[in-house]
Amino acid sequence: MSRQKITRGLALAALSVTVVVAAAKVSGVRRESDGDDAQRRTAPVQSFTVVRTLPHDPNAFTQGLVYADGEFYESTGLHGESSLRRVEIATGKVLQRKTIDPQYFAEGLALVGDALVQLTWQHKIGFVYDRKSFSQRRTFPYQTEGWGIAYDAKSGLVMSDGTDQLFFLDPETYAITRTVRVTDAGRSVGQLNELEWIEGEVWANVWMTDRIARITPATGVISAWVDLTTLWPLTRRTPSADVLNGIAYDPGGKRIFVTGKKWPQVYEIRVLSPGP
């Protein structure tokens, strides 16, 4: 069954909302070595506390989220509903919008310098836009499905395709420079979706769950899980809201933003260290 039929319409009994989780400080998790011990250990689970709640467009099927200069840039999906947006954080107001051709199902989003890079799900094509005008500069091909993408000035681009693989890309040519398999205690972790670089780690939404994997990029080993299943429980959602998806990071304020597909609220949270 197609991913669109399973997830996009799955709705998981939810109300339209987009979440943004901001952590005033990312709580530290003890890092394991890159040796066999780290490969065998199951990653600890972190919880969270809500700092504040913010509004968001409940019709936005969030696929990618980026923080820059006090605003969000957002990619929304679904055929005929896909868009690129600039959003006011405090109000959730869409300040700028570009409608994507209905043939495309938009996915992840990254900001690279003054360019916004947006993936599509199954067309194996990415779009590069001018950040200010949203005018299209170019396209680029890739050989897999497109799910999530994120950029860090030191670490470059990283992309997911819904499997257990992360693809690291040259930010100028978009050529794959290396791949890594993501694991927890030696077991593959698939369904990797929207991505974000946070303090040298890759944070990944895992599709069909409300959990985030914190991944060591050199090895693919998950150092910790952030469990957000109680952030907006399934019992409180109505169709057509879906699962948690979308992570953005404000490095200056050490804030993390997370979102869900068609969620009506944005949550600022603080990530807590795992228990004993």
Image (tube, rainbow, N blue to C red):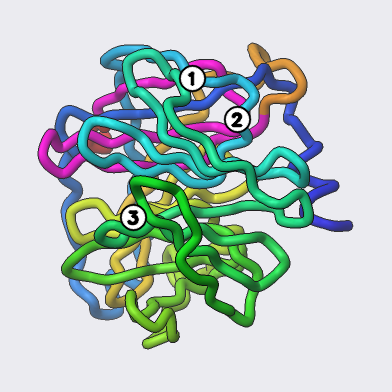
Nearest the viewer among 244 and 104 is 104
Separation of disc 3 and disc 2 at Cα?
A: 19 Å
Separation of disc 2 and disc 1 at Cα?
A: 8 Å
Region of the chain picked out in magenta, as a range: 242-270
| Count of numbered circles in the view | 3
- Name which residue lies at 24% across and 26% down: 270
Upstream in sequence: badge 3 or badge 2: 2
Depth check, mark 1 against mark 3: the one in front is: 3
Q: Which residue is mark 2?
A: 60
Amino acid beneath label 3: Leu
Amino acid beneath label 1: His
Which quadrant does the C terminus fall into?
Answer: top left
Q: Main secondary structure of the magenta part?
A: strand
Give the image location of residue 22, x and y in percent: 28, 29
Residue 56's mark? 1
* Whether label 2 touches label 1, CB < 8 Å: yes
Helix, strand or loop at mark 3: strand
- Name which residue lies at 19% across and 48% down: 29
Would you place residue 13 above or below residue 130 in this image? above
- Name which residue lies at 47% across and 25% down: 94
Inspect the magenta stretch and tell me whether residue 250 lies in it: yes
- Name which residue lies at 36% across and 44% down: 66
Crowding at dot 2, Cα within 10 Å, few <14 / some 14-19 / many 20+, comes out as many
Q: Which residue is mark 3?
A: 111
Would you place residue 238 above or below residue 187 in this image? above
